[in-house]
Image (tube, rainbow, N blue to C red):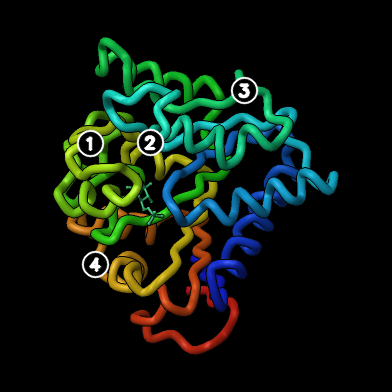
Amino acid sequence: MRIYRAKNYQELSRKAANIISAQIIIKPNCVLGLATGSSPIGTYRQLTEWYEKGDLDFREVKTVNLDEYVGLSGTDHQSYRYFMNDNLFNHVNIDRQNTNVPNGKAADLQAECKRYNELIRSLGGIDMQLLGIGRNGHIGFNEPEEAFEKETHIVNLTDSTIEANARLFDNIADVPGQAITMGIKSIMQAKRILLIASGKDKADAIQKTLFGPVSPKVPASILQIHQNLTVVADDDALSECGLGSEGMIVC
Ligand code: GLP
C-alpha cells in the first residue's frame, strides 16, 4: 500500500482529487465507486473546481455509490443520492443516467441488492473505489463482525454509526436503522482503492486498519491485502500509526 500524508483536510482533498482526476484522464469512461460522508466533500469540491477550469471532463464517467439508507428517497436531503447530486453531480457534466446509488425505497430490497451487483458486473467492475472510514473501522456500511464474503446486502446499523451520523439529521430518531451497502467482497473487487481519512477521531480506526490484524472486527483491515490500495490521510488521522513525517510511505 501507498500512504500519502497530508497536513490538513484541504491538502488531503487536493491529493485525493488529483488521484481521481488522473484516473479520469487515463480512462475517460472509467467506473468510479463513490462515497458519502464529510470526508469526500472537499475532494468533490476540488474536482468541481478543476472541471470548471476545463481540466476535467466527466461526460463518459460512470459512477456507483457504496450505499444508501433504507427508507429514504433520492429527494430526501439526508439520502446519499441527494448528497451526491448536491456535492458533485449537479456541478459537473456527468450524464445522470451514468450515476448509480442503491435505491433505499425499493419495494423488494433483496431484489435491489441483486440488481446492484449485476449492475456493477455489467459495467465491467469498478476502476477506482473511493472510501471514507467510520470510527469503528466500517467501510460503506459494512459494520464490524460482518462476513468479508458479502456483495451488496442489507445491514442493521450499529448504535455508534447511528450516533455518528445523527449530526446530519434533525433528530437521532430520524436516522434510519438499516442501509443497503456494497459488501466487502464488492469493494475488494475494485481494481484500485483510494481510502481517505481526516481527523483525530479516525486515528484509532486508521491504525487498526493499516497495521492491525486483518479481522472482521475492523472491516477496513481487509484492505491491507488489496493489490492496489492508496491511502490519503492527514497528520491527525495518522497520529497513532507511529510513522515518520515523510509525505509518502510505501509499506
Ligand atoms: C457513513 C458512510 C461511510 C463513511 C462514514 C464516515 O457511515 N456510510 O461511507 O465513510 O460514514 O463518514 P465521515 O466521512 O463523515 O466521517
Is label 4 within 8 A of ligand 1 (CB to nearest ligand atom)?
A: no
Residue 213 image label: 4
Label 4 SS: loop
Q: Residues within 10 Å of mark 2 (few under 14, many from 20)?
A: some
Horizontally, residue 158 falls left or right of residue 81, namely left
Q: Earlier in the sequence, mark 3 or mark 2?
A: 2
Label 2 SS: loop
- Residue 117 shows in this picture: no
Return the x and y of residue 76 as percentages of the image width and height.
40, 27
The amino acid beneath tag 2 is Gln
Q: Which residue is mark 2?
A: 78
Q: Residue at x 26, y 18 (%)?
A: 109
Q: Nearer the viewer, mark 1 or mark 4?
A: 1
- State which quadrant residue 181 falls in: top left
Label 3 SS: helix
Q: Residues within 10 Å of mark 4 (few under 14, many from 20)?
A: few
How far is the residue under mark 1 from the one under mark 2? 10 Å
User: For this rendering, which residue is in front, 178 or 191?
Assistant: 178
Outermost residue, right direction?
Answer: 54
Horizontally, residue 4 falls left or right of residue 135, namely right
Q: Nearer the viewer, mark 4 or mark 2?
A: 2
The amino acid beneath tag 4 is Pro
Residue 174 image label: 1
Compared with 169, 221 (above or below) is below
Label 1 SS: helix
Return the x and y of residue 171 as percentages of the image width and height.
23, 43
Is label 3 within 8 A of ligand 1 (CB to nearest ligand atom)?
A: no
- Residue 52 shows in this picture: yes
For the residues bearing labels 3 and 1, Cβ distance under 8 angstroms: no
How far is the residue under mark 4 from the one under mark 2? 34 Å
Residue 119 image label: none
Q: Earlier in the sequence, mark 1 or mark 2?
A: 2
